[in-house]
Amino acid sequence: MDVHVEELPELHLAAVRHVGPYRLLGTAFQELTRLVAAGRLFRPDTMLMVIYHDDPETTPEAELRSDAAATVPAGTELPPGLTPGRLRPGRYARITHVGSYAGLGDAWARFMGEWLPRSGERVGDGVPFEVYRNNPSQVPEDKLRTDLFLPLA
C-alpha cells in the first residue's frame, strides 16, 4: 500500500448532508453537484469529496452521517440547500484508489485495518474523507482515481 503523510491546509466547504448507509450517499452527491453548478461555485481548483462523520462499525447504519462536499474559497456566499463547513488543517495519511467506487470499502478496510496498525500512527482529531480526482462520466470505471484521507494525531 502506497501511503503518503502530508500536511493539509484548512479547507472551506459547501456541503449536502446525508444520513443513512454510506453506500446510498449518491443522491446527496447529485444534489451537491446540481447546487454547486447552479450557484456557479465550480472553479478550476474545486475538489469534490465525501466526508465521513461516523464509524460504520460502531454506529447503526441508519444513523451514519456523511457530507457530499465541494471546496470553496473562505467567505463564499452559498445558495440555499448548501451548508458551510470546513476541514481542519493538519497531518493526514493519503492513499489513492484506482478503480470502481465499489472498491472503496475494501480500500478503506485495508487502509484502517492493515496500514494504520503497522504504521505507528494514531487517528487524530478530524474526519476521514475521499476526494474524487476525475469525473465518472468522462473516465472508464477502472481508471477512476479517488484519494482517501485519514487524519493523524
Image: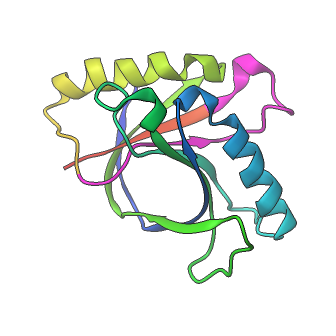
Q: Which residues are magenta?
A: 125-145
At 43% from the left edge and 37% from the top edge, which residue is drawn?
63
* Closer to us: 126 or 10: 126
Q: Is residue 21 left or right of residue 39?
A: left
Which quadrant would residue 37 be assigned to in this image?
bottom right
Considering only vertical position in the picture, is 22 above or below 142? below
Instruction: Give the tally of numbered discs.
Output: 0
* Closer to us: 4 or 113: 113
Q: Is residue 148 left or right of residue 153?
A: right
User: Which is the main secondary structure of the residues drawn in magenta?
Assistant: loop
Q: In the image, residue 9 lies at what x, y percent?
A: 42, 66
At 54% from the left edge and 26% from the top edge, which residue is drawn?
97
**Can the viewer see residue 28?**
yes
Q: In the image, residue 47 lies at what x, y percent?
A: 64, 54
Considering only vertical position in the picture, is 86 above or below 130? below
Residue 141 forms part of the magenta stretch = yes
**Can the viewer see residue 95?**
no
Q: In the image, residue 108 lies at what x, y percent?
A: 42, 25
Considering only vertical position in the picture, is 49 above or below 1? below
Residue 24 forms part of the magenta stretch = no
* Closer to us: 10 or 102: 102
At 17% from the left edge and 22% from the top edge, which residue is drawn?
118
Q: In the image, residue 114 lies at what x, y percent?
A: 27, 17
